[in-house]
Image (tube, rainbow, N blue to C red):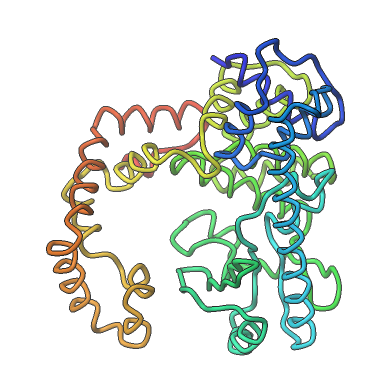
Amino acid sequence: MLNEKDRTVLKLIKSALTGEGFDLPENFSIADYMQYASYRQIDALIYYGAVNCGINSKDPQVRLAFKRVCAGVFIDEMQQDALKKLYAQFDKSGIDYMTLKGINLKDIYPKRDMRTMSDADILIKAGQYKNIPAVMEELGYRFVTESDHEYIWESSALVVELHKSLIPTYDGKLYDFFKEPWDMAVLKENHHYLLNTNDEFVHIFTHFAKHYRAGGIGVKHLTDLYVFKQKYKVDEAYVEQALKKIGVLEFYKNITDAINFAFLDGKLTNKAEFVLKTVLNSGTYGVPEKKNVWASVMNKNSKFRRIIRLAFPPRKNLKQKYPVLEKCGVLLPVMWVVRIFDTVFFNRYKIKNQQQKIAYATAERTDDYVKALEYVGFDMSEVKK
């Protein structure tokens, strides 16, 4: 199932991480592989891997690839500068904060720019949030929106997601496991905290699993799991016990097999090959068609239920578009009517788009998607009820 390009991509990533070169295919084109990399946010990994394999640095396409990598380095420097200023202000203001995911992962790659970061995830204590808007505004951030578990702020240099909780409250077993994240914290310095090593790995993996299930996730995040385990000693017994409790242990075992094949010369099992193909075919956070089918799964393959949810979304989903709902939730029914009127008379293309999505998510595609998830180790019994 894995073709030559799939295997070459995995080898290039491994080469970037380890410095070990290999013989590139005769028809290798850096332009082709960089185009592939862009959709998956692995540009630097592919470029550095190709360089380690002796690609001709004078090739015009290689020079273009180098410029893209340099742009990534510039973005990383901007983000790091913004984070340092944010940390300093939080420390000065006595605000406790816990950095998560990409912020921490960038530091354990051989080169920071090998790991891109779309936004900065930081856990804060809900009781301290009243002191945070002033800090953010002083640093030039603009408040964007609030979701179930986070406040989102942005500046010209960085998007910051300030988490109220590690996991959305509607994520069942996963939310229950991480319900008290500050009990899992270790102090780094000043007011800066991290999750302890074992729980940080569980958090990174369950984030991977959640996105894989809900439409797919890219090879960049599979690489995170490998890099983390290479850097830190993880208590496998603890991790497996935690993942069993959450309900993704079998999936973890198949992902471990996939990582062992991709980066550690392990045996390629059928299920490992299946998940590798799925991850390699995904964008950074999946495939739109699969996300669409997953929405159908969550709606029990009921087109009526899906239409109702689209027409009457919860208040939290509309607060950004209709700020009045922030302080006056009783106006939600009125905003539903306004939204429907606006869609019918001014944005009819949205209706057509949703009709196409609903038509695509047939019962057969939905059933096949559930079976594919069960095959790689997900327990879908709750969804199938």
Q: Position of residue 27 (x, y in %)?
A: 65, 12
Please identify the quadrant where the C terminus is shown.
top left
Residue drawn 57% across the image and 71% down it: 154
Examine the image and state in which quarter residue 78 appears: bottom right
Q: In screen coordinates, is 40 left or right of 44?
A: left
What is the count of numbered marks?
0
Q: In screen coordinates, is 323 left or right of 158?
A: left
Q: Position of residue 283 (x, y in %)?
A: 52, 39
Residue drawn 23% across the image and 33% down it: 362
Q: Position of residue 323 (x, y in %)?
A: 35, 81
Q: Nearer the viewer, residue 97 or 160?
A: 160
Examine the image and state in which quarter residue 50 appears: top right
Please identify the quadrant where the N terminus is shown.
top right
Q: Nearer the viewer, residue 240 or 363?
A: 363
Residue drawn 72% across the image and 70% down it: 82
Q: Is residue 259 above or below residue 107?
A: above
Residue drawn 58% across the image and 33% down it: 35
Q: Nearer the viewer, residue 156 or 132?
A: 156
Q: In screen coordinates, is 92 left or right of 385?
A: right
Q: Position of residue 334 (x, y in %)?
A: 18, 79
Q: In screen coordinates, is 302 left or right of 384?
A: left
Residue furthest out toward the top = 26
Q: Is residue 163 above or below residue 8?
A: below
Q: Is residue 6 above or below residue 121?
A: above
